[in-house]
Structures are given as structure tokens and as C-alpha cells.
Image (tube, grey):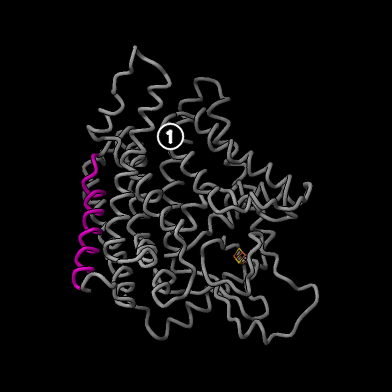
Amino acid sequence: MRPSASSVPAIRHRLQAFGDGLKRRQDVVRGIQWGVVALYAFLLVAPVAAPNGVLSGLARFSEALFWGVWWPGVILATLLFGQFWCGLLCPDGTLTEFASRRGRGGKIPPWLRRAGWPLLGFAWLTVCEQLTAAHHSPRATLLLLGGASLLALLTGLLVGRGKRVWCRYLCPLSAVFSLLSRYAVLHFRVDRAVWDAAPRQPGNSVDCPLLLDVRRLRSNEKCSMCGRCSGHRGAVRLALRAPGSEIAALAGGEGDPRRWEALAIVFGLVGLCYGALHWRGSVWHAALLALPAPGGVSAAWAVGAALLAILLPAAVIGGSLSLALLAVGGTQERAVRLAYGLIPLAGVGLLLGSLEYSLAILEREGVRVAQLLPALRALILAPALFWSARLGWLQLRADVPGRLLPGAALAIHSATLILLAACYQFAPSAL
Ligand code: SF4
């Protein structure tokens, strides 16, 4: 339902006031951030350190909070509203910025600015999480999440002056969040004309912790929605936009579609996440895990088989999607833009995979929810399928492919999306 004409200015005003409030009340934001750091540290360390009697209850609580509430909640919030988690609540962000204000303040080396680190880190974390079943093991959770926090702290100590270099260039989760947030309905909108016309005030520059050029900000990609630029020169405000409008704008030549990001969407966000989260209940997954080791059982062979069980579906799904998009687009450039249209469906696929953790935890506690899974999947997949189809259609309409008739391109694109949605809908559940 569209908001009525009279409610639009009210929504706009409230959003702007919220953004300005974030900037004005940094003291409150910081207090909340340190509260989250304390809770996070307690839930990570206490289940490992607590005596046995207390351990089981605490470990179950922290498992439910990390894997049942936090992970699906952050994915959904980022897809719908942008990376508020990163800018306002993430403990790693708080730690790295705190360390950076007191650390060595070194220059950021060029190798650290390379684009692939977050994606490599995300693939590493996903594979390790599956191999160690970290969601069931407080020790493995401490090792994986705590290890990432230590790296964030170390990065802050070594480079940047009061900035979040970790969040901008290294954080593994930013590989996913920066893609999902392109679809979000909120963003910090910059009016370049107002910015340029505003009188200069010496010493009044934006303290963007992500080191972004706020004057040229057009994308949610790296913005952590911290609000520190809100109201700057009267030109920046938190604003509403149509879902997926940033992706749709690629059709009009706006934005900066990148080949490696398209590969990250098809092989990472779709393929790797499917292999890690949706394939665990399949007979093929079990068959790969049970591959007999030559010359008897060996730990290295078991790890290799587990890796293969994740990477094989990732390669097959990512490869098939790439070929389908190339066939529809006719050129690499169009296929890259079409890949961005997969974000709503792929994001929801990731959300469904993580929601299975929540359902598994509820089942273990005696709440019978497994039978709800098909309906839940259909309910969540339907709007995402619509939005991905719409975004693809906008790309195709703007730039009709050379080799295929528009009707044929649309048919192949729709069939590809429906097949992908069916893969999520009928994925063998491990519940
Ligand atoms: S552009 Fe920078 S300062 Fe502004 S909200 Fe985003 S991260 Fe914060």
C-alpha cells in the first residue's frame, strides 16, 4: 500500500529527524555500542569459561541469540533498511574505531585496499562454520567470531586515525551486507547542488568512519548508516527510496556495476550460501561426505570431502546462473547488470538458510515448527522472486539484447529465476 499524500512529508520529516538525532546524540549511540560489546563478549566467552552445570543453559541461550536471532535478523534488516547494524551496533566496528583512535595511526597499505578481501573472508568463515558446526559449538563460535573481532581490533591499532578501516576494506560480512543494502529502502541522500552552494565553514568536515566521499555518495554499498553526515551543509538526509531503486538505476547507466561483484553474487551470495546452508539435508551431500578415503580413514580426506560437499553445488549453481545470464544479456556487460537483479532472491535465500537455524533451535526446545518450513519459504520467496524479476525486466527493457528477441530473453530470465526460487523452496531441509 502506498503512503497517502499527506503522510509522505511526515515520514520524510521523521526520517530526517532520526538521521539528525543519530548525529546529535553520538554519546547515546556510543553508550549503546559499548553495551553491545559487553553483551557480545559475555555471550562469546561465558559458555566456554562457565562451569559445566551453568554451561549448557548459557551455551543454548548464546547459540539461540547468535544463530537464531542475530544472524537472520541482521540479514533481513540490512536487505530492507541498509547497514544500520554495522554503523550503530556492531561490536567489531566499535572495537576497531576505538583502537584506531588510540593506535599507531598508520597509512592504509595499497594491498589492504584490494576489493577481494571481504569476499575471501566470507568464503573462509562460511566454510569453517560448516566444517566446525560452529552453531552447535561454543568453542568454535568463540574461535570464529572472536578471531574476527581480534583482527578488527588489530586493524584499528595499526592503521587509520579514528576510522573503521576494518569495516571498509576487510570485514567478511561486508561482502554480503554491501550487496544486500543496495536493495534497501533507506539511504543517506546527498543533494550535490545544495552541498556545493552552501558556504564553506573551516573545520566543518564530515567525520565519515568509512572514509567515504560523502559529497559524491550515491550508493548504500559502503555506507554504514551511522548518521554522522546527516544534515551536513544542509544537503544530507536520511531518506526513503523505492526498494531496489539503486539496482534499477544501473539500467539507466547510473552506478558502477563491477564484474567481480557480479561473480560474488552468483558464486558467493547464491552458490556458496546454497552449498553451505541449503544442501546439508541432500543425499548427494551425504554421499560426498561418505566418500571412502583411499587407504583408510584420514582427517585430511574428511575435511576435503566436506569442502567438496559445499564447493561443488556452489560451482554448479554459480556456473549455471552465469551461463543463463550471459545467454539472456548477450554481452558480459549486460550479464553483469542482470546479476545485480538477483540480490533480492539471493538475499532471501540466505535469510531462509539462516532461519533454519532458528527453527532447529525451537524444535530442539520442543516447539514443533518444522512443518511450517514450506509455507514460510513460499511466503518469503514470493515477493523476492517478484522483485528480482522486476529488476531484470527493467534491465532488459532499457537495453534490449542483441542476439535474442526481447520475448525470448525475458522467458529465459524468468525461467532462471523460477528455477532458482524452486531450488530454495524444495531444498532438502536438515531439520
Ligand atoms: S556516508 Fe559515512 S558518515 Fe554518512 S552515514 Fe554513511 S558511513 Fe556514516
- In the image, the segment drawn in magenta is 407-428
What residue lies at 21% left-to-right and 46% top-to-bottom? 426
What residue lies at 33% left-to-right and 16% top-to-bottom? 294
Quadrant of residue 7 within the rendered picture: bottom left
Left or right of 200: which side holds 151? left
Residue 10 on image: x %, y %: 48, 80
| Quarter of the rendered image showing ligand 1 | bottom right
Q: What is the chief secondary structure element of the magenta stretch? A: helix
Numbered-mark total? 1
Q: Which residue is mark 1?
A: 135
Circle 1: residue type: His
Residue that lies at the very extreme toward the front in this rendered image? 403
Residue 22 on image: x %, y %: 62, 65
Q: Secondary structure at mark 1?
A: helix
What residue lies at 44% left-to-right and 59% top-to-bottom? 259
Instruction: Give the camera-side residue of 332 and 115.
Output: 332
Q: Quadrant of the C terminus?
A: top left
Residue 8 on image: x %, y %: 44, 81
Q: Quadrant of the N terminus?
A: bottom left
Q: Is residue 418 magenta?
A: yes
Classed neighbour count for the residue bearing mark 1: other residues with Cα under 10 Å, few (<14), some (14–19), many (≥20): some
